[in-house]
Image: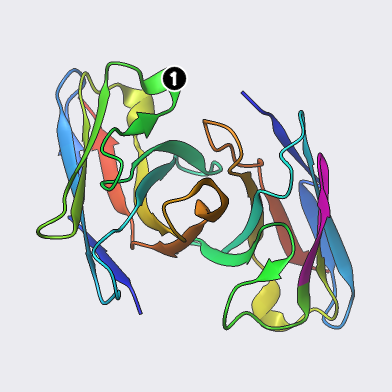
């Protein structure tokens, strides 16, 4: 069974950056396809982006253009999400998830991390 | 971007009831739709993918149907553990948009 363990909660000031990590273990393959999803307090789920190391280039939602960087280290089965120029409305729980596979038909979110609360506060 | 609209936003039901949640896409997404369950303070869990395929370990009282733009999640006989929020998500086009959620409450 795949397990995802995320880094701990962060409190950041507006305009600063944060980096959240997500380490996968327990699967039969190292070809994990990582997705990041966020959830603001009391709100629904929002897709941030994903990276499929097998294919290299990450994808992210247009609204995060220029502020979000998603990367992965295949040697440690760890994904990272870096958000720069933080705003108050970036306050949210950020989840990483593993997709069912790397192909388009498999990009549902099969395994989830425990979530990382990022609070942006002055 | 594709818009995903769930209805209703809130649903009150009793143990043993049969309930249906709808999810409508603004454009065809073929069958690339997933359903998730989320309980307060917890990460979501996958229930159904490819519109109607039950994830391993998910009780058979959950089922999904639909294709194109209209989809449904059905719980055949509600159990106490099923009271939660449910989300649909399309994975046909970037960004892989979620519906706004349906909160299933105890009547």
- At a point 27% along the width and 41% down the height, the residue shown is A118
On the question of residue B41 being in view, the answer is no
Q: Is residue A39 left or right of residue A96?
A: right
Check disc 1 and report its element: helix, strand or loop: helix
| Residue in the image at 77% along x and 51% along y | B10
Which chain does tag 1 point to?
Answer: A
Query: Circle 1 sits on which residue?
Result: A62
Q: Image quadrant of residue B59?
A: bottom right
The part of the image, by quadrant, that contains residue B97 is: top right
Magenta highlight on residue B7: no
Range of magenta residues: B63-72
Taking A122 as reference, is A46 above or below it?
A: below
The overriding secondary structure of the stretch rendered in magenta is strand
Q: Is residue A94 left or right of residue B50?
A: left
- x and y, in percent, of residue A23 in the image: 20, 61
Give residue A36's position: percent from left, percent from top: 37, 44
State the residue in front, B18 or B97: B97
């Amino acid at each position: 069974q795949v397990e995802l363990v995320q880094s701990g909660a962060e409190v950041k000031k507006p305009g600063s950056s944060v980096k959240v990590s997500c380490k996968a273990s327990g699967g039969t393959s190292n070809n994990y396809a990582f997705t990041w999803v966020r959830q603001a307090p009391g709100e629904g789920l929002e897709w941030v982006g994903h990276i499929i190391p097998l294919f290299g280039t990450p994808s992210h939602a247009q609204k995060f253009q220029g502020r979000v960087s998603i990367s992965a280290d295949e040697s440690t089965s760890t994904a990272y999400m870096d958000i720069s120029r933080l705003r108050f409305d970036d306050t949210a729980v950020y989840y990483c998830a593993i997709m069912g596979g790397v192909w388009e038909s498999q990009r549902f979110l099969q395994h989830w991390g425990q979530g990382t609360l990022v609070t942006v506060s002055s | 971007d594709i818009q995903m609209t769930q209805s209703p936003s809130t649903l009150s039901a009793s143990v043993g009831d049969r309930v249906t949640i709808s999810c409508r896409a603004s454009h065809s997404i073929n069958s690339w739709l997933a359903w998730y369950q989320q309980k307060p303070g917890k990460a979501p869990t996958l229930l159904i993918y490819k519109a109607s395929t039950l994830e391993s370990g998910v009780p058979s009282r959950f089922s999904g149907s639909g294709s194109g733009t209209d989809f449904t999640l059905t719980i055949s006989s509600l159990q106490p553990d099923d009271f939660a929020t449910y989300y649909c998500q399309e994975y046909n086009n970037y960004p892989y948009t979620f519906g706004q959620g349906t909160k299933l409450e105890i009547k």
